[in-house]
Amino acid sequence: MLLIVGLGNPGKEYEHTRHNMGFTLVDELDNQWKKSSEAGHDHEEGHTHAFELDRQTNKTVHAVEYELDLEDDEYEYHIHAGLMKPQTFMNRSGEVVKQVIKSLEGRGFEVAKHLLVIHDEMDLPFGDTKLSFGRGSAKHNGVQNIIDQLGTQEFHRLRIGIGRAPETESKDHVLSTFNPQEKKQLDSITNGSIDKISDWILGAVRAGARDTH
């Protein structure tokens, strides 16, 4: 079981802000997997399941689970992958991530192997994307809350560069929307990010296959 968490803030007023890049990518991945499932594509055919969560947790998260059939040059893999968007606002993201991970106990879930957190990153130039493992939060409050709640920073992250605005406070920058020039690049950034997520998924699945042999 893999869990992909996109970070952001709920509400229309935050929908297109830099801080919601994690939500944006999880939504795009959900759309692609849903379309692929409905079309019956062999490489990503799947079925959608609701997470089995208690009533209180259900109020604080949008989550869906897919069964996917993936393949590389050598093997075919049948996997379960969850997509998740915490609805607790950014600074409390870790609370519900911890609750959902607890619900996965008994399914072989390991944070260091099976968790990917997607978030905006001011320390990367706008448009750059980078897969990382075991890094500190770099003062990203959502990431720091996940680290605090899980008691570890040993998990994978996809960092989406939003750059810095030297004359703007960090809080104002992350909650700002993209300028017209940046908006023209968003499709390319999204597509490149989806490719990196797919690479991570295959890497995690291959590692799991090696562990069982």
Image (cartoon, rainbow, N blue to C red):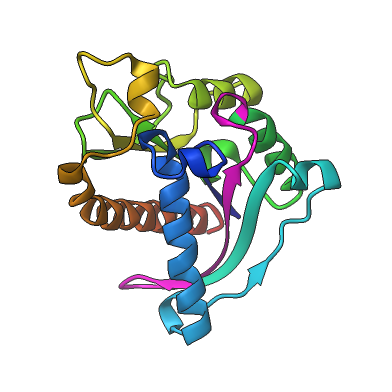
Residue at 21% over, 55% down: 188
Q: Say above or below: 178 vs 29.
A: above
Residue at 77% over, 42% down: 57
Is residue 125 on the magenta stretch? no
Quarter location, residue 28: bottom left
Q: Say above or below: 197 vs 160.
A: below
Q: Which residue lies most toward the left here?
A: 181
Q: Is residue 7 visible?
A: no
Residue at 28% over, 58% down: 191
Residue 122: image location, x then y, percent = 30, 25
Q: Quadrant of the N terminus?
A: bottom right
Q: Nearer the viewer, residue 52 or 151?
A: 52
Q: Nearer the viewer, residue 43 or 10?
A: 10
Residue 56: image location, x then y, percent = 82, 41
Report the span colored magenta: 69-92
* Residue 114 relative to residue 100: left or right: left
Q: Nearer the viewer, residue 5 or 132?
A: 5
